[in-house]
Image (cartoon, grey):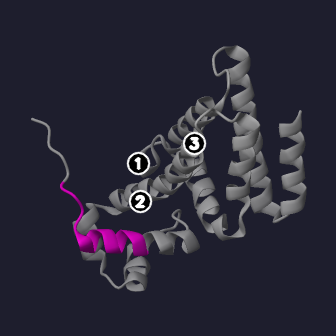
Amino acid sequence: MATTKPAPSARETELLEAAYAYSLTHGLADLSLRPLAAAIGSSPRVLLFLFGSKDGLIRALLARARSDELDLLQKITSQYDVPPGLEVVATELWTWLAAEERRPLMKLWVEAYGRSLVAPDGPWTDFARSTVDDWLDLLKSVQAEPEGADAQARRTGVLAILRGGLLDLLATGDTDRTTAAIQQYLAD
């Protein structure tokens, strides 16, 4: 008999949001429950009770970060009646990704993506693969002609340039250079 987890309590939701804000500043790799709990007005025991384990909390935080990403994808695709094409959507995505106020989220995403690749077990399991699938699905949904090997290669290239540009932007802070590179690629 399958069991489902009950809806989160108001306190669980409140602590998850506070822990998410904390993780955007401090990251997840070296997350320690004691400092986290103190910073968000809780205790390690309460966090363990609500999330089951430190890994459970990290999984919840990754799911929370992913929901921000999926909300963005939904907002972009829902504004069009007809698929606008990869270039239009990729430009919108880049504007969103490159915004200064999203740097903490993007750094958290890069950290989780990297951890998923080098530590595929535990809370990071399938994070990288899931985000690739999410973004490729979005890009396919906005292509005028999404079928075929060429269409698949083009959306893979767009995804690669967006992610590469994002890594470079986070490493250097050079928005003008990375934006120009993205725009040049999308114009080709």
Separation of residues labelled 3 and 2 (CA atoms): 29 Å
Q: Which residue is mark 3?
A: 77
Residue type of the residue flagged with mark 1: Gly
The boundaries of the magenta stretch are 6-18
Residue type of the residue flagged with mark 3: Thr
* 9 or 46: nearer the viewer: 9
Horizontal side, residue 23 vs residue 63: left or right: right
- Mark 1 and mark 2 lie on one chain; the one further toward the N terminus is 2
Q: Secondary structure at mark 1?
A: helix
Horizontal side, residue 96 vs residue 117: left or right: right
Q: Secondary structure at mark 2?
A: helix
Q: Position of residue 43 (x, y in %)?
A: 30, 81
Question: Which corner quadrant holds the N terminus?
Answer: top left
Q: Which residue is mark 1?
A: 122
Residue contact between numbered discs 3 and 2, judged by CB atoms under 8 Å = no
* Nearer to us: label 1 or label 3: 3
> For the view shown, which residue lies furthest in the front direction?
81
Q: Residue at x 31, y 82 (%)?
A: 42
- Mark 3 and mark 2 lie on one chain; the one further toward the N terminus is 2
Q: Which residue is mark 2?
A: 58
Question: Which corner quadrant holds the C terminus?
Answer: top right
Q: Is residue 14 magenta?
A: yes
Task: Give the total number of marks visible in the rendering.
Answer: 3
